[in-house]
Image: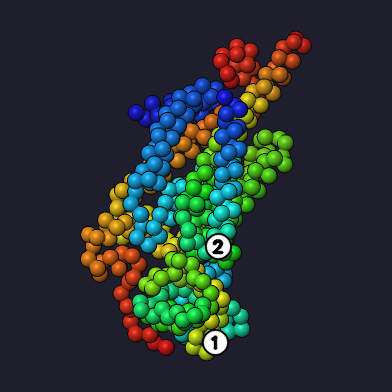
Amino acid sequence: MWTFLKKLYHQLASPPHFYRLSPTFILWLAVPGYLLILYGTIAGLVYAPVDIVQGERFRMIYVHVPAAYLSMMAYMIMAIAGGIGLIWRLKLAHAVAASAAPIGMAFTFLALATGSIWGASTWGTWWEWADPRLMSELVLLFLFIGYMALRGAIDDTTRADKASAVLAMVGAVNIPIIHYSVEWWTSLHQGSTLLKEGGSGMQDTAQLYPLLAVIFGFTFAFGAMLLRRARTEVLIRERRTRWVKELVLSNEGDL
Amino acid sequence: MKARHQRLLAVGLVVAGLAIASALTLRMFSENMMFFVEITDVRAGNYPADRNFRIGGLIEEGSMHREEGSLDISFVVTDLTCDVELVYTGVLPDMVVEGKGIVAHGRMDGDVFVADEVLAKHDENYVSPEIAETMTQHAESVAAGAAERGPECPH
Amino acid sequence: MNKAILVGFIAGIAFFVRQIVKAIYLEVPTESPWTYISACVILTALVVAFIEWHARRHHRNICRDIEVRVKAVEERL
């Protein structure tokens, strides 16, 4: 078992193997991912019963929560992959870190935008500057923007990988701050429903299952997006190698 | 020590150092990170007297009064230990109702909080009509965020 | 095919903008929550579609770039 895992690790960590095998993984992540999202969205938006306090408005949870959770997940993957890349000098890890940034930025933007729309309809305000949850999530958006700007500013890929990995790890202190902001300080934003102490704050399974479905669905879809971008990043880092040249010349399907 | 172990140690030390530094910074600025002041603190006089600030709490059941023919509204905000009366002129968001959470911006005028903005604060509970029906009246109000009254207000 | 996607995309943006403008004009919302819900869902669909499209375009550009360079080197040899 151990030797098998070790072999699998070495195969996947080798860029040509990763490049060749990743389309299969992408397919196996994307199909169940988008199916779960489809089920969760329809069940959540149409069939789930309303919330007795918020009414229909609570349905925005089915896009806001997955976006917010993935924004933090993407940042953690970016920081951890960057760290692995620094310590083990693994090009593939840097490729994954670089791929997580634009996706993470998109989901952070979505979390902020959908949260703002929900806030406008329930709280009565689009944005509150002093709220710790809103501020720390906005800082996350700036971290993603800064990370990508830093990458864009350095032409040499190896140097860009190292510098941006350090930035990603430094910024990772923001993740626990986002998560615990609603517990450490008073805030307008409510606490976590699913991770609430003493059981979930959503007891009706007709509301809960669609939410879990979109969360898992978006996670799988995120995995597919990440691998798709990682393939491109691997190609950039390996463009002078023989296997890429052979791949181009043999022209086996699309690259 | 191999070069890889050195890098591991360096990265580990930097991350640990940053975590400690930010934890200390956050502790120092914890007061400023608060979005609103609890009612108990307001009653104890722990609020900025010279400027506007926010209070947060639940609207006491049965305390909402609307002045006929005007937009003047008053209600009691409670953190289940202490209470403070709030007055506001204007239209409230429709989720501002008795027994639910609010955050209000304004200042203290004597014993009364004069608000210039009242926002609804939703809690982390989502209750469907079916679930509400299966619960007793008491359990429902607890699940919907209305907790038990705490100890007597010391102020 | 591409044209159809583009038309859908523009229609989505137009609808999103319309919903947001409606939501802002409502100020204190007493009207349909579906204005807000649809704005959230449309925005999410648009952003996800955009980053997926962007990833594919980026990949194509990089491939073309490498292809041109490799072929140029081959011809010189």
The x and y percentages for residue C10 are 60, 38
Q: Which mark is residue B109?
A: 1
Is label 1 in contact with label 2 (beta carbons under 8 Å)?
Answer: no
Residue sitting at x 59%, y 55%: A139
Compared with residue A177, is residue A91 higher up or lower down, i.e. above or below?
A: above
Check disc 2 and report its element: helix, strand or loop: loop
Residue sitting at x 29%, y 49%: A205
Chain of the residue on which disc 2 is drawn: C
Task: Say few, some or many: other residues with alpha carbon within 10 Å of mark 2 (under 14 / 14 to 19 / 20 or more).
Answer: some
Q: CA distance from mark 1 to mark 2?
A: 29 Å
Compared with residue B87, is residue A164 higher up or lower down, i.e. above or below?
A: above
Q: Name the colouring of the figure.
A: rainbow
Query: As shown in the figure, which amino acid type bears the numbered disc 2?
Result: Glu
Most foreground residue, B141 or B7 = B141
Whether labels 1 and 2 share one chain: no
Farthest residue to the front: give it.
Answer: B69
The x and y percentages for residue A186 are 48, 69
Residue behind mark 2: C27
For the N terminus of chain A, the quadrant is top left
For the C terminus of chain A, the quadrant is top right
